[in-house]
Image (cartoon, grey):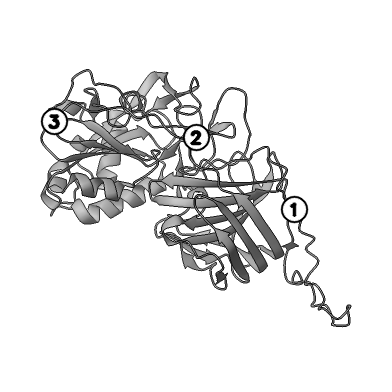
Amino acid sequence: MVMGAAALLLNACDSGGGSGSGDSDGSTTVGDTVVGTQDGGGMVAQDAAVGPVNDAGTAVTDAGSGLPPGNDAGSTPVDPPMNADCDQSGFTAAQEIAVVDPGASGTYMIYQAHSSAQPPLDLISIEINAAAAPASGSTVDLTGRANMSLAGADLVVALASGCGQQGCASWLLADGGTITFTELSQTGSIVATLTNVIFRQVTVDQNTGMASVTPNGATWCLPEWNINSAYEQPPELPKGGPAQPNCVAEGTGNLQFDNVANLQLQNCYGETVSLHDACGQSKALWMLATAGWCTACDQLIASLKQQFAGADGIMSRASIAAAQPGLDMWVILGENKQSAEPTLQYCEAYAQEKGLDPAMVVIDWVNPEVSVPLVDPEGYAIGTNSLGNVWTVMNPYLVEANGGVTLGFPWSGVLRGSNMEYVWSDYIPGSDINQTLGELLQ
């Protein structure tokens, strides 16, 4: 997703994964890891795995010359081009892509048009919450949508410029014009037209997800843009199971529905915490991975504290169980503020700063890096230091997308408390964390 809570490139955090670095403001996510030699070198976003593809067949060229004359052989005056007050006008695509992203915050339908097959590039992005998608045949007025809350936004129409491996130089939101959906189907295509759209540069408050027009910021006009693309469906992914009714010390595998092996990590106090010590003690164990530089993680933790912190304002495993009987949680610190290995001292300071019980925060950094196999395509893997232990016993279901692999914080996984069955994690298509926890906590 591209913006806000519904959006990756402005509001999700990028994982360095031991091979790259994240942005301290959580503003961009790019593919850190090259799969084989097929590096598309383009935009890859957490949850979205959106990147350039070798598809020149559907590129659209926009003349950007204003509105056409009427049907009277040109006797009706042509409206003036809408770029009179715009810094730029029109768009020419070298390639387009449409994907269905079953991410942690819900399933989104994502369309992007790229001005080039390689960075630097500009892009148009349309992201739609599948659960609240506009009906086919409907028209949405985009006026005023540059000043909006991006937290859970159902429709985001954006344009970005100067995009490269380190993100985009600027993001602009549609603030005028319309989008008409001739056809829109999660399992089919997006056929739509943008008409007289004005994009305005925005600034996003990373704490609230609120976007606002940047004073004296850039503007970009798009008189017309036609879209006709079939959505690429997520691949069929391998499953494990059926799980044994009780915990299995060595585990039965690392795929969804397998029993997870007894993971042991150090908490901020230097104490060894064993996963299987919690067998049968809860209905659901939430494994929440964070990084010191990740502002999206900070926002999530702050939200969770509002629900689960004790009277002292500290969130602990005990306070979580008291607020939500049956729920347990590990907070897994994968990287420090410099995308490097967190020390015990850093871990304790991090926990205190975020209002977390240091005993519930564990460190997961592996030296040397470990190899985590991809589920698609088979036979490929990425190397990582961060989360190397967790992702060894819980396959994160990473997939290659146009030469890159998406890694992002925060990352969540859910285990069944009775037997440590791997039930769900962020990159597994289908349900989301709220649905998963709700079912386990019944």
Which residue position is annotated with label 3? Answer: 279
- Where is residue 74 drawn, in percent x and y? 88, 78
| Label 2, label 1: how far apart the Cα atoms are | 31 Å
- Taking depth in this image into account, of 11 and 188 the one nearest to the observer is 188
- Where is residue 230 drawn, in percent x and y? 59, 48
Is 332 left or right of 375, judged from the image as shown?
left
- Taking depth in this image into account, of 288 and 350 the one nearest to the observer is 288
Residue 92 numbered mark, or none: 1
- Where is residue 81 drawn, in percent x and y? 78, 72
Amino acid residing under circle 2:
Ser
Is 150 left or right of 68, judged from the image as shown?
left
Q: Of circles 3 and 2, which is in front? A: 3
- Taking depth in this image into account, of 249 and 72 the one nearest to the observer is 72
Amino acid residing under circle 3:
Cys
CB atoms of marks 1 and 3 within 8 Å: no
Q: Residue at x 31, y 32 (%)?
A: 256
The kind of secondary structure element at disc 2 is loop
Amino acid residing under circle 1:
Thr
Examine the rendered structure and indicate whether residue 389 appears above or below residue 210: above
Label 1 vs 3, first from the N-terminus = 1
| Label 3, label 2: how far apart the Cα atoms are | 35 Å
The kind of secondary structure element at disc 1 is loop
Q: Of circles 2 and 1, which is in front? A: 1
Which residue position is annotated with label 2? Answer: 21
Q: Residues within 10 Å of mark 2 (few under 14, many from 20)?
A: many
Q: Residues within 10 Å of mark 1 (few under 14, many from 20)?
A: some
Q: Residue at x 65, y 63 (%)?
A: 193
Residue 48 numbered mark, or none: none
The kind of secondary structure element at disc 3 is loop
Q: Residues within 10 Å of mark 3 (few under 14, many from 20)?
A: some
CB atoms of marks 2 and 1 within 8 Å: no
